[in-house]
Amino acid sequence: MKGRTATLAQKHYHSLLADLGCIACRKDGIRNTPVSIHHIDGRTKPGAHWLVLPLCSGHHQDGTGAPGLIAIHPWKTRFEARYGAQRDLLKECIQLLIEQGHVLPGEALVAAGIELEAA
């Protein structure tokens, strides 16, 4: 796939997100791992590897995973109607990681639109 290569910090961030399990399944009250990392806004823009969601195969790509799940590819509108806007889901993921005691890179917070507290 075309795109920028993720840095070590971004790969670590992806790993933390993956440990949460699928955010869509979580909203349905299910803990579902493993996940793949879904890029919200493609892979080529600056900061693209900070704008990601952990999704199980069925919520990521249609025709994979458990039947009956709404996959973001190709059903983005249906997916967001059910689970919420992707950036809001990302903010939920970040909040969960913070509640677990993880210190996240400022770039991840900024990309998600979360204000950094002044020191």
Image (tube, rainbow, N blue to C red):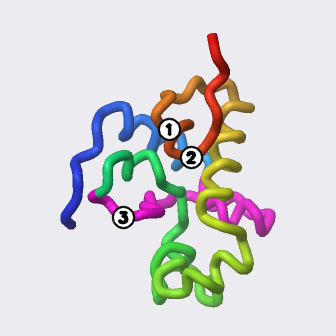
Give the CA separation, mark 3 to mark 2. Answer: 14 Å
Q: Residue 110, how many percent across, how many down?
A: 53, 38
The label number, if any, that marks residue 60 in the structure image:
none
Left or right: residue 96 compared with residue 47: right
Q: Residue 82, how many percent across, how many down?
A: 73, 78
Q: Which residues are magenta?
A: 21-44
Left or right: residue 91 compared with residue 109: right
User: Which residue corresponds to the image point at 61% horizontal and 84% vertical from the top-left?
Assistant: 77
Amino acid type at mark 2: Ala
Residue 36 painted magenta: yes
Tell me: residue 42, above or below residue 50: below
Residue 88 painted magenta: no
Whether tag 2 and tag 1 are in contact, CB under 8 A, the answer is yes
Tell me: residue 45, above or below residue 118: below
Q: Quadrant of the N terminus?
A: bottom left
Q: Report the residue marked by disc 2.
A: 112
